[in-house]
């Protein structure tokens, strides 16, 4: 039997942001509980760029950002993400960034697209596999 690893940090993918922007109740409850429990909520900059359009519609999304640690993409991360895309046969740099960020921070991933992330995780073969939490 495999020991479970507690992942106190979480990473949001674009689907999580879209759910918050749409005022999805489950997403907001999940976010408030995570922030209230002191979990490290991570948002990679490429995910924000994929969703943000700067319109008035983003008021809910802007509120969500207050509880997030927005992390930049370094050159080393860019190389790791590119390598993962090559290994997985994927061109989705944003999803690969989410996976690599989760591996780096030993974090769970909040996602609306577990299928694509499973394939990237399979290709990455991390020592500790991030949990996927469906939005």
Image: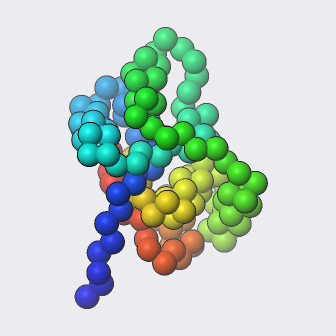
Q: In this view, does 17 lie to the left or right of 78?
A: left
Residue at screen point 29% across, 75% down: 4
Q: Is residue 36 left or right of residue 94?
A: left
Q: In which quarter of the image is the N terminus?
A: bottom left
The percent coordinates of residue 44 (x first, y second) are 56, 44
The image quarter in which residue 83 lies: bottom right
The percent coordinates of residue 47 (x first, y second) are 56, 41
Q: Identify whether 21 is placed above or below 26.
A: above
Q: Identify whether 79 is placed above or below 22.
A: below
In this view of the protein, can residue 111 be seen by the observer? Answer: no
Residue at screen point 32% across, 46% down: 38
Number of marks in picture = 0
In this view of the protein, can residue 77 be seen by the observer? Answer: yes
Q: Quadrant of the C terminus?
A: top left
The percent coordinates of residue 13 (x first, y second) are 47, 45
Q: Nearer the viewer, residue 89 or 101?
A: 101
The image quarter in which residue 131 lies: bottom left
Q: In this view, does 36 lie to the left or right of 53?
A: left
Residue at screen point 53% across, 76% down: 125
Q: Identify whether 107 is placed above or below 5.
A: above
The percent coordinates of residue 118 (x first, y second) are 46, 65
């Amino acid at each position: 039997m495999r020991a479970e690893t507690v992942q106190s940090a979480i990473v949001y993918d674009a689907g999580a942001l879209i759910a918050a922007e749409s005022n999805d109740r489950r997403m907001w409850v999940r976010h408030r509980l995570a922030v209230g429990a002191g979990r490290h909520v991570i948002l990679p900059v490429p995910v924000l760029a994929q969703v943000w359009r700067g319109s008035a519609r983003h008021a809910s999304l802007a509120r969500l950002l207050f509880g997030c640690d927005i992390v930049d993409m370094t050159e080393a991360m860019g190389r790791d993400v590119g390598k993962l895309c090559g290994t997985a046969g994927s061109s989705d740099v944003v999803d690969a960034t989410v996976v690599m960020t989760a591996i780096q921070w030993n974090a769970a991933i909040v996602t609306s697209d577990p299928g694509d992330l499973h394939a990237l995780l399979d290709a990455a073969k991390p020592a500790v596999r991030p949990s996927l939490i469906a939005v």
